[in-house]
Amino acid sequence: MTAPAPATPVALGTGPAPALEIRDLVVRYGRGRKARQAPPAIDGVSFDIMPGETLGLVGESGSGKSTIGKAVLGLQPPTAGTVRLHGQDITHMPLKQRSRQVADLRVVFQDPYSSLNPARTIGKTLVEPLRLMGVTGREALAKARSGLESVGLPGDAVDRYPAQFSGGQRQRIAIARALVCDPKVVVLDEPVSALDLSTQAQVLNLLADLRDQRGLAFLFIAHDLGVVRFLSQRTVVLYRGQVMETGPVDAVALAPRHPYTVALTSAAPVPRPAEQAARRAAREALGMGTAGTAQASATGCPFVPRCPLSTDVCVEQRPPLRRLDATLAACHHAERVPAR
Amino acid sequence: MSVLPLDAADDVATEPVPPAQRRRGLPYFLRRPGGLFGAVWLVFMLAASLTASLWRPYEVAEQDLANRLALPSGAHLLGTDPLGRDLLSRIFSAGAEPLLAAAVTVLVAFGIGLPLALIAAERGRRVERVISRVTEVFLALPATILLLAVIGVIGVRTFIIMAILGVLISAAVYRVMLGVAQSVRQRLYVDAARVNGLGSLRVNLVHVLPSMATVVAVQAAQLYGIGLLIVAGLAFLGFGPAEPAPSWGFMIQDASSYVFNAPWLLVPTGLVLALTVVAANELADAIAGKASIARTPTRRKRPLARAIAAARGDAAPADPAAILEVRDLDVSVDDGPALVTGVSFTLRPGRVLGLVGESGCGKTMTARSLMGLLPDGVSVSGGSILWQGRELVALPDKELTAIRGREIAMISQEPMVALDPMFSIAYQLVQPLRRIRGAGKAEARTIAAELLRQVGIVDAERVLKSYPHELSGGMAQRVAIALALTGEPKLLIADEPTTALDVTVQAEILSLLRALVRDTGLSVVIVSHDLGVVADICDDVAVMYAGAVVEDGSAVAVLDEPAHPYTMALLGANPHVPDGEPVPERLASIPGTVPPPGSWPTGCRFAGRCQFVQEKCTVPFPALPAHGAGSVLCVRVDEIARAGATWEADDIGAEVAPGAGLTAEPIATEPAATAGGIR
């Protein structure tokens, strides 16, 4: 199966077929004239994830990063575009059919408190997807136990209820539920943002271990570029449903070429006072506009109202993604972005 | 490998009662007197009524003309009616019909309303709209007239009539259940089950319905009571079983005509009907009351510590330049465990102090105690808070209120909490300005606009006219800061002021706070879990763990040269690295979780999770001076510093070893085998 030529050349990887392929994804919420006039939640996003690779999807609230996760999982039907898993088009495949044909795609949600049914034991929660795949009861329970052990919890946790676990432990259980069917691609929707720092580190280390042991591909959705940098090889920076910049994660974090990425990277504080003071001075010198003040024009770049580099062309024309040094950035004036 | 009971590692902040503590046996609603009465009475009535033909002392139509309108006696336990018929026999013989017919109404109403609600919640807006429009038509129908019309056509057939009533009421049931079903469906575990490929029926049966069970039970029990009254009401109007067959409604109607010469006649039937309806409602209350069992908040008493501090009176601060001096502060649950112990710090004018640590370490409790804003049942149990030479711990509430908002103000993580959604921003700023500063209306509005400009809002006039919901999160936090500034405070307590905001907005708010400190000489106590925020804005920092300060000093000293293992670990767990440094292969992590208040170990509270733990860590020891004027609470700090040891990240694969995620290993009696660096 061959993919049609992508409208935007986002795929940096060449060689083996991607595990997950997103092409020109558009998602609109609601129906009717009003909804059609509003800018879509996701506006023409494309990217690939190779087997064993982690792609970090980073953006602030309202950027549409979780919507992409939902569209991939089939929880939010896309308005246009395609989602392919190992080359198979699953864009509009019903959830029930997915579980039989492609047990390869699973999810870990952000909130470890509402993502586990409080009325069911951990064992029941873990066995559920296995039984659907036709695994016998006894075998499923054995798999559930070994699944819990593989995320660092004792196997006898199967008899306990979610309320008996702390946030970090629940997130381990949610990871075990995602991995118990041996998937190849896992959507991680802000899996550590609800956790304390030390617990977050435990879960990030665990995810890195599991990925390396099992060759998993992750779509890692996060708002924190530091966390994304730890776990991902490549990253996609989203703003208002559009890709601003994409490329190897270190290049995006250290030598960003899009003004929004510059704003994002310079705003994340580092725990070293001297270094942070220098970053702060650099950030304040950028002259970045205040968030959420004005509406962007529908035809142009969504970042115009906050961008210190914007000119008339930015209002009129939406900039395409184009190659710059190590990354692809959607900016007319990327060459004028100061190097860091 | 030994493992702590999972309950002990529970996160106390969010999970007050782990279900492991639930008692087995009786369902919870039967443990309340109302619930027990309701259930027992209904079961008794049902059993007695259905078996009435087997045990009743007289036949229902059997007349004892010598004993008409008799009071209770040995022959007639509840007395007799105008025709000398035995009331006991008649009441219980009449009971089966209303008890069963009301159940028919409930079954029909829920049998239709509940599945419709589940379907509408699942299928989305279009289906929901169609179903809702149809149910609205049902709700608009005049039920009483319709029922009387039906009786006119088919005659008095109670069960069919009550079933039709059930159909009409199903619309109301649907409305209530739809709301519940929609909110349950938003929970992530429903999404997770759908991603796992669970079919629609099983998602509803396994994940949605059980979470709705309480509401269903409450509504059903209430509807049952209403159904009973309607059956009796119809019989009262003459639409019940024909004489001589007994019915509660007709018996009451009969009694009402003798109410002056034989008032007793009304009592047995009326009482049985009333008790049965009350029983249904009590049962509903008991089922619904699960959440309200929580202990009633105790009135805040004047704690002992206040009396002690009051006797001590105001004192001169040890540091003459200090605006705030906290000494050996203890905060505890009344008659319960301590939440904060021995916290001391000093704040000078125009300085920013950070309280940093993980959740459950007492940072917020410490910050709130400064304003006397502790939750009910929690109070300062020792130590002193000297604010400009005044002892705040001893201060009566009235005087504290005068300080709050004027001298000390507060902003919180969620700016919307500070803003009332009902009023415009202008109103909310003008009110305190007039009250605190005594400004006139026009003057207050001018000051309000100035305050908004001071917090970096360019179009102040437009924001003044808007309402809280029209503001973005960052804008709302700016307004909340402006609100805090209305009393021209000298100290601002900021509890996680940027945690809910995006990083670019966070940077803007931190810049704003820094400008306020620089321009107005404001002092700030900022509570944060983010060491990057601390590095950005704080002059001094106190690292808290399990209710105690484990390390404090200048932010530069503590963050660049951490001395306490916990501070080292927190820094190692932070994935944000300065630009020049590579991202680590693995992050440092701390095994286990923060021990909850009440189960802190003696000696070092971090010992159970520390890489450098030794036997001497288990006995209490004093804090040692460090970082100039600061301190560190670690008995091995010198050894660790001499060896140049750092908190080591686990080896690859360590996280997947069983137990790695939850053990707080029992304190080793010999040096921990895995301790990094030194022995």
Image (cartoon, rainbow, N blue to C red):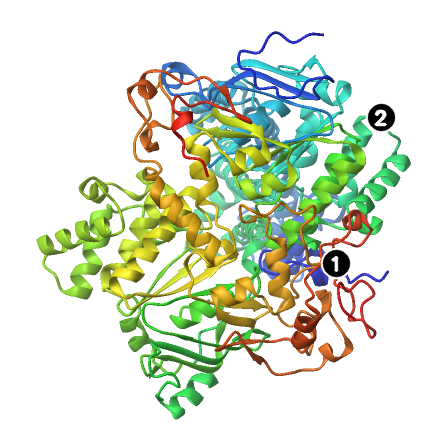
Using the image, tell me which numbered label, if any, was put on residue A98.
Answer: none
Whether B471 is drawn above or below B489: the answer is above
Which residue is outermost to the bottom?
B311
| Residue under the point 82% across and 51% down | B658
Residue B82 percent coordinates (x, y): 53, 48
Q: Which residue is mark 1?
A: B6
Q: Nearer the viewer, residue B137 or B378?
A: B378
Relative to A249, B9 lies left or right: right
Whether B501 is drawn above or below B234: the answer is below
Which quarter of the figure is the C terminus of chain B placed in? bottom right
Respond whether the residues carrying marks 1 and 2 are from the same subunit. no
Q: Nearer the viewer, residue B277 or B198?
A: B198
Look at the image and tell me whether residue A20 can be seen.
Answer: yes
Q: Secondary structure at mark 2?
A: loop
Which quarter of the figure is the N terminus of chain B placed in? bottom right
| Residue under the point 48% across and 65% down | B555
Using the image, tell me which numbered label, if any, was put on residue A134.
Answer: 2
Residue A141 percent coordinates (x, y): 86, 39
Relative to B631, A278 lies left or right: left
Q: What amino acid is found at the position of numbered circle 1 in the picture?
A: Leu
Residue B129 percent coordinates (x, y): 46, 21
Chain letter of disc 2 in the image: A
